[in-house]
Image (cartoon, rainbow, N blue to C red):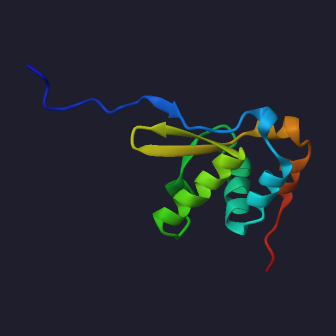
Amino acid sequence: MPSATRAPDTTVAPLPEPARADLRLEDVLGVLSDPLRLHIVQKLLLESPDTDRSCGWFGIDRPKSTLTHHFRVLRDAGVTRQQQYGLERRSRVRIEDLDARFPGLLDLVRAWRPAD
């Protein structure tokens, strides 16, 4: 007889992303030109470089659909890697890939300060 309760799905499924060789500087700079996306990437780099984070971790007061869009744009350009954990998507910066393709770029993102 099947159990009435199910164990949570802990399967981690990576979402589609461009290969390292396909990363384009114009795409990366284009997505980072948005201050919110730049903030997301900087926060990941400074506070959680080795850990996947859900969009709720960022504490950004925007509709979920807006955040979903921004995270998808970052992933499609190859800036972040997203993985599916059950119903939740978590992101991290593709540090090794970006450093290999565009040396120094992530140092600039880490040092960025928003305009007052």
| x 65%, y 39%: residue | 17
Count the marks: how many?
Answer: 0
* Res 96 visible: no
Q: On the rendered structure, is 56 left or right of 108?
A: left
Return the x and y of residue 52 as percentages of the image width and height.
58, 41
At 44% from the left and 45% from the top, the residue drawn is 88
In the image, farthest residue toward the top: 1
Q: Nearer the viewer, residue 58 or 30?
A: 30
Q: Residue furthest right?
A: 104
- Image quarter of the C terminus: bottom right
Furthest-left residue in this view = 1
Left or right side of 106 for 42: left
Residue 37 at what x, y percent from top left? 68, 61
Residue 31: give x, y in percent of width and height: 73, 58
Please tell me which residue lies in front, 60 or 19: 19
Image quarter in which the N terminus is found: top left
Q: Is residue 73 left or right of residue 113?
A: left
Q: Is residue 69 left or right of residue 78?
A: left
Q: Position of residue 30 (x, y in %)?
A: 78, 59
Whether residue 74 is visible, yes or no, is: yes
Which residue does the image show at 81% across and 33% down from the upper left? 21
Residue 13's place in the image compared with 98, above or below, is: above
Q: Is residue 7 above or below residue 85?
A: above
Q: Which residue is at a point 59% across and 37% down the rendered structure image?
A: 16
User: Can you tell which quarter of the image residue 39 is in?
Assistant: bottom right
